[in-house]
Image: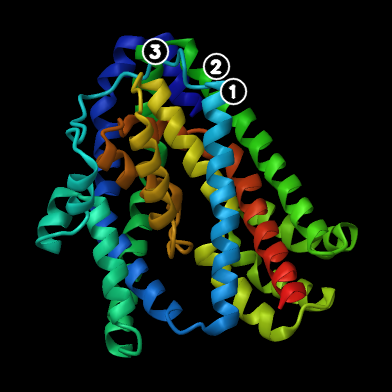
Amino acid sequence: MAVGAGVGLIWPEFGQSLAPVGRIFLKLIQAVIAPVLFGALVAGCARGAGIGQLGGRAVVLFEIATSIGLLLGWGMVWWFEPGVGVALRSAPVAAAPAANFGEVVANLFPASIFEAMAKGNVLQIVLFSVMVGVAAQGQERFIRFAESVAAVAYAFIRYVMLLAPAGVAASMAATVGAGGFAVIQGLSYFALLAWAAQGLFAGVIALGLWGAGVSVRRFAMAVREPFLLALGTTSSAAALPKAMEAMESFGVRREVVSLALPLGLSFNLCGSTIHLAMATLFVAQAAGIALSPGQQVMILATLKLTSKGVAGIPRANFVILSSLFTAFGLPLEGLAMLLGIDAVIDMIRTGVNILGNCAATAILDRRS
């Protein structure tokens, strides 16, 4: 980020000439959206269809928690408006034409999944994948195929991310060259708000524990190690074994731990959902795009669906945001701009993911 921002400030015209390099990087991410969503959602829904009564209660709890996270993140950016004044310059983006409610619902169903993938119609891909995943439960060979598709897509993304330094630096140079110092100010403000939002949600977690009769002090001591591991590795999956051990030591039944914590990696990434909501509205503000109430509801609903089952993707948030921006006409240049400060936010985001999963496990054990 620093190199690209410096180039944009000192040589603004040269910085703007680097925009095509950033677009190549973003197009490579776009290219893998469809296989990621299809593979991850089909496998996740198929595996999760038979989780039983305890799993059903866990999913309900996860959905409540992630909904609170989405609304909190959206509300923080809506109230403080960190993107206003950034003046993000971008290539023209074709937004979806206005339609009434009936047309929107009808458009959710694809006539051809291949056409939906070719056009990048994210909502159609998501709905089709969820339906196929539910229908595929018990079909082990097909589920393994979907998992293989997702695994190849993950590997592709890992290779693309090797180009991230050059792509992000070029995009930052172009963005700062066009928008000036206001871009850096807006990003710094956004990063500060991101930490504040994650801290507020940690308070929500504490309230939930207290309401369920779980000792907040004992819980904080129990999850200290997995939380610090998540901060250090910025990987929810890497902290999972330590989190399972910590929850068993805390007194949660093994059957609850073995079901809820792994399931939470797909369904309960609260820190990530907060960031997804904040990043989307921030880019809309930066680009000067006014979202109607209906668009806002559709965006939040799309984030709820697309964020499931992608925990193993490197930089999964950016794959999700890329698909969302394409669907709702938001500039992809905002993605590279956010990637430049992602390292500042990723630690606390991952830590809150682990806190949320551990807290949900403790509450589920107490209430079941």
Vertical placement of 137 versus 19: above or below? Answer: below
At horizontal 44% and vertical 53% (from top left) the residue drawn is: 304
Measuring from the top left, give residue 327's x and y in whole percent.
26, 42
Q: Residues within 10 Å of mark 2 (few under 14, many from 20)?
A: some
Q: Amino acid at mark 1?
A: Tyr
Measuring from the top left, give residue 30's x and y in whole percent.
26, 47
> Which residue lies under the disc numbered 1?
189
Q: For the C terminus, which image quadrant?
A: bottom right
Quick check: marks 1 and 2 in contact, CB under 8 Å? yes
Q: Secondary structure at mark 3?
A: helix
Quick check: marks 3 and 1 in contact, CB under 8 Å? no
> Which residue lies under the disc numbered 3?
179
Which badge, 2 or 3, comes first in the chain's sequence? 3
- What separation in Å lies between label 1 and label 2 (alpha carbons)? 6 Å
At horizontal 51% and vertical 82% (from top left) the residue drawn is: 51
Which badge, 3 or 1, comes first in the chain's sequence? 3
Quick check: marks 2 and 3 in contact, CB under 8 Å? no
Measuring from the top left, give residue 337's x and y in whole percent.
42, 30
Question: Residue 43 got which mark?
Answer: none
